[in-house]
Image: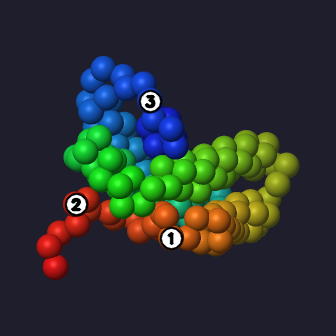
């Protein structure tokens, strides 16, 4: 939903978009809380520390994406238009440098979890590949955004708009 909502060329708006934004932001927060619970309740005991830390790195990566949907759910299109006025290519940054890489890494980790369950890879390999993959994806997207669109977007995770008075 958010990759669609933050697409660079917004056009068509769904009826009840604000309600959908709020539901999706709440679902994202609930999902992250459920993953944290699962990590502590099952993953650490069942799969060991390497998998647990890879899982927690993944959760950390996903939690970085929560700020924008919460702002959107609270501020709606007014917030989004204010951001685009301040940072003209921020929608490209949202979709291309945040949601697409994070979705790809999450999908890869889900596939890796099936390999782990089938004993194709071990705990240490899973932890190294996907723990490192999350950190690598985070670093590469940050550095790529700085190289390709440095002054017309921001990497701040919390973006109040309009900014509070100084």
**Front position in the image: 69 or 15:** 15
- Work out which residue is located at the far left of the displayed protein and give it: 165
Q: Which residue position is annotated with label 3?
A: 11
Q: Residue at x 17, y 69 (%)?
A: 164
Q: Residue 83's x, y, as percent? A: 35, 55
Closer to the N terminus: mark 2 or mark 1?
A: 1
- Work out which residue is located at the far bottom of the displayed protein and give it: 166
Under circle 2, the secondary element is: loop
> What's the CA distance linking mark 3 and mark 2?
23 Å
Above or below — where is 103 with respect to 53?
above
Badge number at residue 164:
none
Under circle 1, the secondary element is: loop
Label 1: how many residues lie within 10 Å, few (<14), some (14-19) or many (20+)?
A: few
Q: Residue 19's x, y, as percent? A: 26, 30
Q: Residue 20's x, y, as percent? A: 32, 30
Closer to the N terminus: mark 3 or mark 2?
A: 3
**Front position in the image: 149 or 57:** 149
CB atoms at circles 1 and 3 under 8 Å apart? no
Badge number at residue 151:
1
């Amino acid at each position: 939903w958010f990759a669609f909502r933050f697409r660079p060329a917004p056009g068509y708006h769904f009826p009840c978009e604000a309600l959908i934004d709020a539901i999706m932001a709440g679902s994202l927060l609930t999902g992250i809380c459920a993953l944290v619970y699962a990590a502590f309740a099952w993953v650490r005991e069942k799969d060991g520390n390497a998998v647990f830390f890879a899982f927690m790195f993944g959760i950390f990566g996903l939690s970085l994406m929560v700020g924008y949907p919460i702002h959107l759910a609270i501020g709606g299109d007014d917030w989004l238009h204010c951001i685009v006025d301040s940072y003209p290519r921020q929608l490209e940054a949202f979709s291309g440098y945040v949601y697409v890489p994070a979705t790809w890494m999450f999908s890869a980790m889900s596939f890796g979890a099936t390999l782990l369950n089938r004993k194709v890879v071990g705990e240490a390999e899973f932890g190294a590949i996907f723990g490192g993959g999350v950190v690598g994806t985070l670093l590469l997207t940050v550095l790529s955004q700085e190289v390709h669109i440095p002054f017309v977007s921001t990497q701040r995770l919390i973006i109040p708009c309009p900014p509070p008075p100084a």
